[in-house]
Image: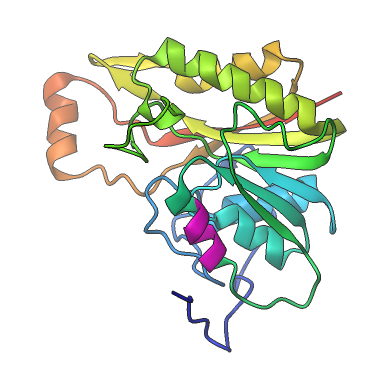
């Protein structure tokens, strides 16, 4: 099935300013090019565009090792960056392929590979200019339910085990990234038994442990979680606050 693309496809947002603070908020999610918001857990194209423009240059080789709905691939193609797109989920890869079926006035290349981010052995040491990705938050969203598969990250419920496995991802990302270059990870926190679980900071530590240095910790406000109705009452009755932010860590390999 071929994705039909409007000949008048808009490749850029009507208004866009590069973010210059450590708090990012995008109340209205962009829908230019082939971007769609129906892939659960995908990140906003505004986040991706900011990262690509700030931490890479045209014709750089980018990597998103958990491509998901294809947001990173779309922006990389528009902004004239080559990209390697990786995911363990064939549905994600197929969606990414379809999302890339539009023309741009540049010669950017896209490589799409089904692979586990914990073992990127097809990528050479220090091959990549910039890494950006949005991993699952433990098993809050399961992307491959019902399959007899090895335990992928979105099927791990135990937080400590999840963080250990992300540590393997961090090790691979450190290996494939060029020196002096950057790696950006967007991840949020969760709750277990009414207690706050600092998942993001545990993941951050794994990246520091393999050798990355922390360049930025950006707070991204969430707008897809409406604090109304059931959850407002639940928050009051059980005395806990609703989590409405994520951490966007930008690491550098020195």
Vertical comparison of 199 with 69: above or below: above
> Where does the image place residue 126, in percent across and percent down from the top left?
85, 33
Point 69% across, 47% down: residue = 51
Vertical comparison of 21 with 206: above or below: below
> Where does the image place residue 106, in percent across and percent down from the top left?
80, 73
Can see residue 204?
Answer: no
Colouring rule applied to residues: rainbow
Vertical comparison of 92 with 15: above or below: above
Q: Quadrant of residue 176?
A: top right
Q: Classify the position of the C terminus by image quarter.
A: top right
Task: Looking at this view, name the residue that lies furthest to the bottom.
Answer: 7
> Where does the image place residue 249, in percent across and percent down from the top left?
63, 30
Q: Which residues are magenta?
A: 93-98
Point 59% across, 67% down: residue = 100
On the picture, is 195 further left or further right than 71? left
Task: Looking at this view, name the residue that lies furthest to the front.
Answer: 148
> Where does the image place residue 164, in percent across and percent down from the top left?
53, 13
Q: Classify the position of the N terminus by image quarter.
A: bottom left
Does the stretch in magenta take in 56? no
Point 74% across, 63% down: residue = 79
Magenta span: predominant SS is helix
Q: Quadrant of residue 38?
A: bottom left
Does the stretch in magenta take in 95? yes
Q: Quadrant of residue 80?
A: bottom right
Can see residue 62?
Answer: yes
Pick whichever, 24 or 105, lies toward us: 105
On the picture, is 135 further left or further right than 151? right
Pick whichever, 232 or 127, lies toward us: 127
Point 38% across, 16% down: residue = 197
On the picture, is 175 further left or further right than 115? right
User: How many numbered marks, from 0 up?
Assistant: 0
């Amino acid at each position: 099935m071929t994705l039909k693309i409007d000949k008048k496809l808009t490749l850029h947002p009507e208004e866009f300013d590069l973010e210059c603070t450590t708090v990012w908020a995008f109340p209205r999610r962009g829908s230019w090019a082939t971007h769609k918001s129906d892939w659960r857990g995908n990140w906003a194209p505004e986040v991706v565009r900011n990262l690509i423009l700030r931490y890479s240059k045209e014709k750089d080789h980018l990597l998103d090792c958990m491509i998901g709905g294809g947001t990173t691939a779309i922006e990389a193609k528009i902004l004239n960056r080559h990209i390697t797109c990786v995911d363990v989920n064939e549905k994600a890869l197929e969606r990414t392929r379809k999302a890339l079926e539009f023309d741009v006035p540049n010669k950017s290349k896209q490589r799409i590979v089904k692979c586990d981010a914990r073992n990127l052995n097809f990528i050479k040491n220090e091959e990549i200019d910039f890494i950006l990705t949005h991993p699952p938050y433990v098993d809050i969203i399961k992307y491959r339910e019902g399959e007899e598969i090895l335990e992928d990250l979105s099927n791990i419920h135990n937080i400590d085990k999840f963080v250990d496995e992300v540590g393997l991802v961090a090790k691979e990302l450190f290996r494939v990234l060029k020196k002096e270059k950057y790696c950006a990870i967007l991840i949020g926190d969760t709750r277990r038994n009414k207690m706050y679980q600092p998942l993001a900071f545990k993941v951050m530590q794994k990246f520091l442990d393999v050798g990355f240095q922390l360049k930025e910790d950006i707070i991204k406000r969430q707008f897809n979680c409406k604090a109304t109705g059931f959850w407002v009452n639940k928050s009051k009755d059980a005395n806990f606050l609703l989590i409405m932010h994520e951490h966007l860590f930008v690491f550098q390999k020195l």
